[in-house]
Structures are given as structure tokens and as C-alpha cells.
Image (spheres, grey):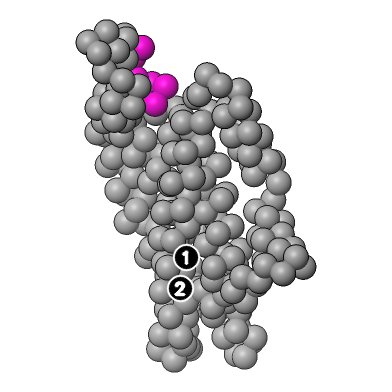
Amino acid sequence: MDSFLVLGQKYFPYILKGAVVTVEITVGSLILGTVIGMVIAIARLSKHAICSWPAAIYVEIIRDTPALLQLFIIYFGLAGYGIKLDPLSASILTLGIIGGAYLSEVFRAGIQSVERGQIEAALSIGMRDHQVMRRVILPQAFLLILPPFGNFLIALIKDTSLVLTISVPEIMYQSYNVASQTYRSMEVYALAAIIYFGLCFPLSRFAKWLEKLRPPP
């Protein structure tokens, strides 16, 4: 136990620097994923096949292929065509694209949960489609979307560990460096686990609290 504390005092600040990068990736990819997810959700709900079909194909491709493969395509694959992204940008772009596919299903489910009668009533008083979406559908869907959105955020924080493979100095990359130098893998990765737990546990409790706000079915 004493050796673990000594190791922690020496290397914990170094690994904690990786947490800053992890948060940067999480925030960037969450913003990008939210924008993509909302656009894709609306496209999938469109009555026009020219909008709904490409959106559905996008979601299926992303969900049915490994995230690590998608990261390699964006970072290594695009470089072969002259599009060279730095590791941090490639990480945010990849996780944002992946997040967009999953969040689109969350948003679509929330939008579809609004009673059709309320939409028809809004249309009958002269509201346009975009007004119905903004004033009727989205406010009601918001509370339904929040709990799964919170769960997605927790998963996203953990998924940032994938970018270790392209040398982004996040938590796992920093931990791997320390473990390679000290040969104390168990203790080092335990420190990493503590940091991940510190990031995710408050969000997990918050997500559970949000579930209590959901209106009854």
C-alpha cells in the first residue's frame, strides 16, 4: 500500500494531465456528435427518401463497424489521400461521427415519443413544420432525451481510451508510458481507473437523477 501511495504521489499528476486531454476530446466530440445526431435524426424522420435513406445508411455503417477501424480510416486512411489530421483533431472527428450515429437514434426516439395529436393540433392552428418542431416537439422530447444522453456521455468518456492507438496523450496513453517506465502496471492502471471513476461517477449519478424527471408514459 505504501509503495502504491509513493507511486501515486510521483506519477498521478502526470497521468492527470491526460485527463485534461480526455475532457477536451469528450467535449469536442460531444458537440460535433450532437449536431450530427440532430441533423441525422431529422433526416431519418423525413418523408423524402432522398433524406431518410442516406441517413439510415450512415447510422448502419457506423454502428456495424468497429470504432477503432473508423479511427484508423480517418487518421491513417485519409492521410493517404493528402488529408492529414493531427491526432487530436482525428480523435474528435472520429468520436463525433460515431456519436452522431448513436445520438441520432436517441433524438429520433425522443421526437417520436411526442403524441401525434399534439402535432396535428399545432398544425391545425397554422403553425409551420419548423415551428411545430421548435415549439411543440423539442421541448417535450428534451426531458426524454436527457437520461440516455447522459449515459452516452459516460460511454464517450470511456471510449476516448481508443485514441491511445494514435498517440493522443490522454489518460490511457499517459498511464501506458508510466507503466512502461516503472513496470508497475497494476498500480499505474489502478490510478487511471481512479481518474476515470472520478470523471464518470458524478455523471452516472446525475443521469439517474435525470431519469426521475422523465414524464410518466
Q: Residues within 10 Å of mark 2 (few under 14, many from 20)?
A: some
Give the side of residue 196 with respect to residue 211, left or right. Answer: right
- The label shown at residue 35 is none
Query: Which residue does the image show at 41% across and 54% down from the upper left?
Result: 31
Q: Nearer the viewer, residue 143 or 130?
A: 130
Q: Position of residue 97 (x, y in %)?
A: 56, 51
Instruction: Tell me the amino acid under the disc marked 2.
Output: Val
The answer to which quarter of the image holds residue 94 is: bottom right
Query: Which residue does the image show at 43% across and 47% down from the upper left?
Result: 34
Query: Which residue does the image show at 62% across and 76% down from the upper left?
Result: 167
Residue stretch rendered in magenta on the structure? 111-116
Q: Residues within 10 Å of mark 1 (few under 14, many from 20)?
A: many
Give yes or no for contact between labels 1 and 2 (Cβ–Cβ under 8 Å). Answer: yes
Instruction: Tell me the amino acid under the disc marked 1.
Output: Ile
- The label shown at residue 21 is 2
- The label shown at residue 25 is 1
**Looking at this rendering, what residue extends furthest in the right direction?**
80
Seen in the picture, residue 82 relative to 150 is either above or below; the reply is below
Q: How many marks?
A: 2
Q: Position of residue 39 (x, y in %)?
A: 47, 38
